């Protein structure tokens, strides 16, 4: 009977451990975009970054490809550490992942309210022009008829870039939705946040259409900006850039490393963002299982 009970306990424990490891990778389920070199088992020879999110697809490398690195990621302030992490690093301008509109393998998303999460590290000052961390946008679906940018494509665009001045030690992240009123709506950039250099940080941006844009650093709210901008989810957002904002702007490369880039097609709550921040780095299942199995055997 003791053997039978121990076998049953073993099965339950192993199942629980496997579940907890899987849960640690993506605690808030069903992101539409989910780029994580660990989750997609990226190799140095891969020329595309595969999307593990619900819409699938991949983003091709640009003129050059960021370097795949492996090692430890730690955020001491919130007690997050993984010795089994992986990330891509841009080493110069034009080392990006970016797809053209005609790329049939690229992910397609439809967004109204949305949440963007980035686990990233800034490595230094500008390569050229702006640091643009990522971009998602529609193909042009109408022209702007009036206003300061009349005649420009009426896209829906979300971008994050770093406002680096001087040595680039002080860094900011901003977001702009580029419909006619978007640039004016966010012209004062009240939604900046400082993430410093040479440190890993989680950045989350929550967009509630027609209501607000909220920024979080390492799970803590740092800015909340009201907005009248409303997005139409009917329009396909099919142009992507990672380490840049678009295929045509590869020279505007972020001098940074990105370990996880995740987009949800809804506004996550503060509690959900904290789950992602604290549980998104995978633990080592083999090591965890060995230690726990040893404790279990000693207790039987």
Image: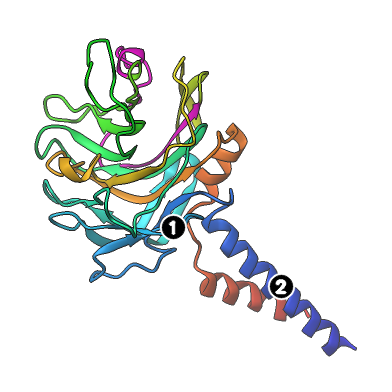
- Label 1 close to label 2 by CB (< 8 Å): no
Q: CA distance from mark 1 to mark 2?
A: 22 Å
Local crowd size for mark 2, using a 10 Å CA cut-off: few (<14), some (14–19), many (≥20): some
| Residue at left offset 49%, top offset 68% | 284
Work out which quarter of the rendered image holds the C terminus and state it.
Answer: bottom right
Q: Position of residue 266 (x, y in %)?
A: 55, 37
The residue labelled by disc 2 is: 13
Magenta highlight range: 183-208
Q: Which residue is mark 1?
A: 82
At a point 47% along the width and 41% down the height, the residue shown is: 110
* SS for dot 1: strand
Q: Residue furthest left?
A: 128
Residue 252 forms part of the magenta stretch: no
Left or right of 246? Residue 299 is: right
Labels 1 and 2: the sequence-earlier one: 2
In the foreground, 296 or 146: 146
Given residues 147 and 201, the one toward you in this image is 147
Quarter of the image where one finds residue 7: bottom right
């Amino acid at each position: 009977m003791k053997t039978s009970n121990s076998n049953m306990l073993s099965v339950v424990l192993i199942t629980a451990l496997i579940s907890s490891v899987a849960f640690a990778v993506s605690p808030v389920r069903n992101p539409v975009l989910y780029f994580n070199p660990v989750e997609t088992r990226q190799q140095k020879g891969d020329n595309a970054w595969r999307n593990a999110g619900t819409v699938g697809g991949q983003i091709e490398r640009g003129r050059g490809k960021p370097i795949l690195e492996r090692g430890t990621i730690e955020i001491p302030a919130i007690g997050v550490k993984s010795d089994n992490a992986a990330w891509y690093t841009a080493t110069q301008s034009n080392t990006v992942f970016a797809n053209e509109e005609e790329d049939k393998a690229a992910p397609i998303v439809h967004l109204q309210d949305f949440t963007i999460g980035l686990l990233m590290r800034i490595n230094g000052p500008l390569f050229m022009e702006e640091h643009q961390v990522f971009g998602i946008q529609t193909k042009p679906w109408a022209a702007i008829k009036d206003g300061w940018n009349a005649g420009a494509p009426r896209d829906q665009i979300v971008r994050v870039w770093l406002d680096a001045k001087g040595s680039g030690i002080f860094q900011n992240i901003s977001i702009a939705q580029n419909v006619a009123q978007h640039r004016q709506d966010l012209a004062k950039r009240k939604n900046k946040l400082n993430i410093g250099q040479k440190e890993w940080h989680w950045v989350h941006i929550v967009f509630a259409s027609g209501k607000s844009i909220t920024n979080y650093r390492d799970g803590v709210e740092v800015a909340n900006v009201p907005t009248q901008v409303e997005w139409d989810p009917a329009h396909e957002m099919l142009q992507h850039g990672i380490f840049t904002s678009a295929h045509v702007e590869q020279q505007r490369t972020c001098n940074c490393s990105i370990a996880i880039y995740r987009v949800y097609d809804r506004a996550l709550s503060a509690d959900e963002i904290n789950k992602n921040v604290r549980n998104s780095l995978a633990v080592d299942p083999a090591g965890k299982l060995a230690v726990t199995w040893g404790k279990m055997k000693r207790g039987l």
